[in-house]
Image (cartoon, rainbow, N blue to C red):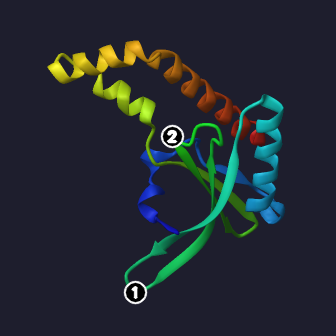
Amino acid sequence: MALSADWLSDDRRFIDRVRFQDGSNVTLEVIRSYIQDKADSYGIPIAFNADTVKTGSLFNKQSEDVLVLYNTQHPEYIKFIIRVSYQGTYAFLDVFQFGASKNIRNENQASGFSTGAIFKSLINSATGHKQKLEDENNYYTILHDCFMSLIE
């Protein structure tokens, strides 16, 4: 399944672009292995799927390989597109949020003062939604730390 380049927008970035001056050894497989090891050491479940993103213009269509990272225990969480590109001796790592989260959607629907929002808020309270949302946000924080350790 080829992903749309629409997901590769700055407003969907999970981390700021990471650049490696000597990027000859930076590949999707190297990033995959590193992030998997970090996630394992931090105790969070992740897995990867290989995919492609269609880029380019109407007359210059291109396709590039990417990885999609997801939570194996919570497929309803946001997924992430990992992209490595090159220019000169540099490699650039971009990570974008992909898809939507059921917990975040439920939280957004419960905000406000409409009858529907109040009803959704009551359902969220009865189902332990606050804890689920906190757990999900903690997961994203740990995942962010995995990526940030690349530049330490």
Circle 1: element type: loop
Counting labels gives: 2
**Residue at image x 58%, y 22%?**
135
104 left or right of 20 in image: left
Residue 113: x %, y % from top left: 18, 16
Q: How far is the residue under mark 1 from the one under mark 2?
A: 36 Å
Q: Circle 2 sits on which residue? A: 76
Q: From what the image shows, is residue 52 above or below residue 78?
A: below
88 left or right of 98 in image: right
Instruction: Pick whichever, 89 or 6, lies toward us.
Output: 6
| Residue 116 falls in image quadrant | top left
Q: Which mark is residue 59?
A: 1
Q: Residues within 10 Å of mark 1 (few under 14, many from 20)?
A: few
| In this rendering, the label closer to the viewer, 1 or 2 | 2
77 left or right of 34 in image: left
Residue 143: x %, y % from top left: 66, 35
Instruction: Pick whichever, 140 or 91, lies toward us.
Output: 140
Please identify the quadrant where the C terminus is shown.
top right
Q: Which mark is residue 8?
A: none
Residue with the most extreme bottom position: 59
Q: Is residue 93 visible?
A: yes
Q: Tell me which amino acid carries mark 2.
A: Glu
Q: Tell me which amino acid carries mark 1.
A: Phe
Q: Residues within 10 Å of mark 2 (few under 14, many from 20)?
A: some
Residue 126: x %, y % from top left: 39, 13
